[in-house]
Image (tube, rainbow, N blue to C red):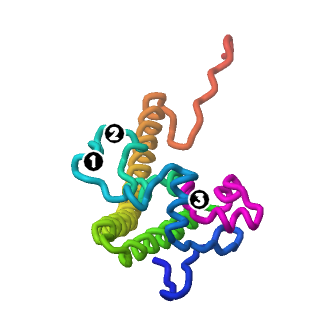
Amino acid sequence: MAEHADDRPASFKDKNGRDWIIDITYGSFARIKRMTGCDILNKIVTTKEELPDPETCELDKLPIASRLAFDDEYFVNILFACCARDAEAAGITDIDFGESLRAEHCTAARDVFLEQVRDFFRKKPGGEPAVELIEQMIGAIDKFRQAETRVVPVMQRRMKAIAADVDRRIEDEILKFEAELEVPTGGKLDSPSPVGSA
């Protein structure tokens, strides 16, 4: 997670080295709602009755917190809305903004954004349910990353083992084919004798 002093706005860098400040205020929530339709301020906490079935629902029907955590396209649109005033001042369009973010920049921005939203609700009267939810989402993201860290080496070893097995099977088939043709290992088929030769 990004480190920052409490009295200094948090930021992340894009691939061009530009710093983008994430300052969560009532104004930024209003701008996000106006530009994306996402009402984080009032809708981030979802009641049990409002929760869709995660097995069957479409991605755009998932709760806001889930989409902020795992839907990159959705998050980048919200991130641009959050940073829109600075982007406009710098003459940067939403397309330019998206082009400046690789996966690692989006990851860093998400960490900062969720921390800032959590801190906003932590200081807001009645904001504790939102804080608890965001803490759960941050924890889920961390567990997902830890799982990836553990799984990737295992998958790499498994893929190497599969590749070695495939190579061995191919070699066995080649040897079997050569034996059926009575070709010495590494040799060539004898050229047929010319017709009518003595």
> Number of callouts in the render?
3
Q: Nearer the viewer, mark 3 or mark 2?
A: 3
Look at label 1 and name its amino acid.
Answer: Leu
Quarter that holds the N terminus: bottom left
Q: Residues within 10 Å of mark 1 (few under 14, many from 20)?
A: few
Q: x, y percentage for residue 130?
A: 33, 66
Q: Residue furthest top?
A: 196
| Left or right relative to 50: residue 7 | right
Does the magenta run of residues contain 171? no
Give the CA distance from mark 3 to mark 2.
26 Å
Q: Name the residue tied to disc 3.
A: 81
Q: What's the amino acid at mark 3? A: Ala
- Above or below residue 143? Residue 122 is below
> Which residue is nearer to you in this view: 113 or 26?
26
Q: Earlier in the sequence, mark 2 or mark 1?
A: 1
Badge 2 is on which residue?
Answer: 57
Mark 1 / mark 3, whichever is N-terminal: 1
For disc 1, the marked residue is: 51
The one of 101 and 43 positioned closer to us in this rendering: 43
Name the main secondary structure of what is drawn in magenta. Answer: helix
Report the residue at 45% width, 41% height from top: 170
State the quadrant of the C terminus: top right
Residue 47, compared with residue 181, is above or below; it is below
Q: Residues within 10 Å of mark 3 (few under 14, many from 20)?
A: many
State the residue at coordinates (54%, 66%): 27
First to last magenta residue range? 76-100
